[in-house]
Image (cartoon, rainbow, N blue to C red):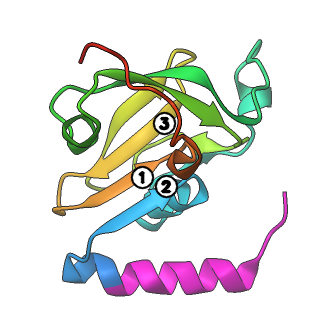
Amino acid sequence: MRVDPQRDELELELLETFIPLGTPVLGICRGAQLINVYLGGTLDPDIYTSHEGLKRRRTVLPRKTVDIVGDSQLHRILRVSWCRINSLHHQAVRQAGHGIEIVARDRDGLVQGIESRDHDFLIGAQEHLEWLVFEPRPSSA
């Protein structure tokens, strides 16, 4: 894992500016983690050591199944109660930050989606949604 303090500083400054203004924010992977930490949450620094028996699925292909909370923004946007996602991360949200709800978990119990109760659009998705453009939607919501 590479650490980039300048990137951290820039992105935290952006959150500090945009969150109080109510600016829509979508955090993908590291961005979801950063939103959570900015709001006082914690991370699991290495999911493979803290979750015994977890399969390493570091791939852009949709290999994990995620369950989505029914009355969440993520559910309303995707219009499904579950979906298949990719997995490239080794960290995940552990404890939700202030005002953050966990709205999606994979079948291993890892947090895959968060959103704010206090903002109109502040969502974090652990998966790389931008690489799932060819994944067909499940037939039932």
Label 3 close to label 1 by CB (< 8 Å)? no
Q: Residue at x 79, y 25 (%)?
A: 56
* Range shown magenta: 1-17
Q: Earlier in the sequence, mark 3 or mark 1?
A: 3
Q: Secondary structure at mark 3?
A: strand
Q: Classify 66 as above or below 35.
A: above
Q: Secondary structure at mark 1?
A: strand
> Which amino acid type corresponds to the residue marked 2 in the rendered image?
Ala
* Chief secondary structure of the magenta portion: helix
Q: Secondary structure at mark 2?
A: helix
Q: Residue at x 29, y 21 (%)?
A: 81
Disc number for residue 32: 2
Going by the image, does 26 lie left or right of 58?
left
User: Mark 1, residues whose alpha carbon is within 10 Å: few (<14), some, or many (≥20)?
Assistant: many
Name the spot of residue 97 as percent of width and height, x first. Answer: 38, 53
Q: Residue at x 19, y 52 (%)?
A: 117
User: Mark 2, residues whose alpha carbon is within 10 Å: few (<14), some, or many (≥20)?
Assistant: many
Observer able to see residue 139 = yes
Assign the C terminus to one quadrant of the image.
top left
Q: Residue at x 66, y 35 (%)?
A: 87
Observer able to see residue 40 = no
> Which amino acid type corresponds to the residue marked 1 in the rendered image?
Gly
Q: Which residue is mark 3?
A: 112
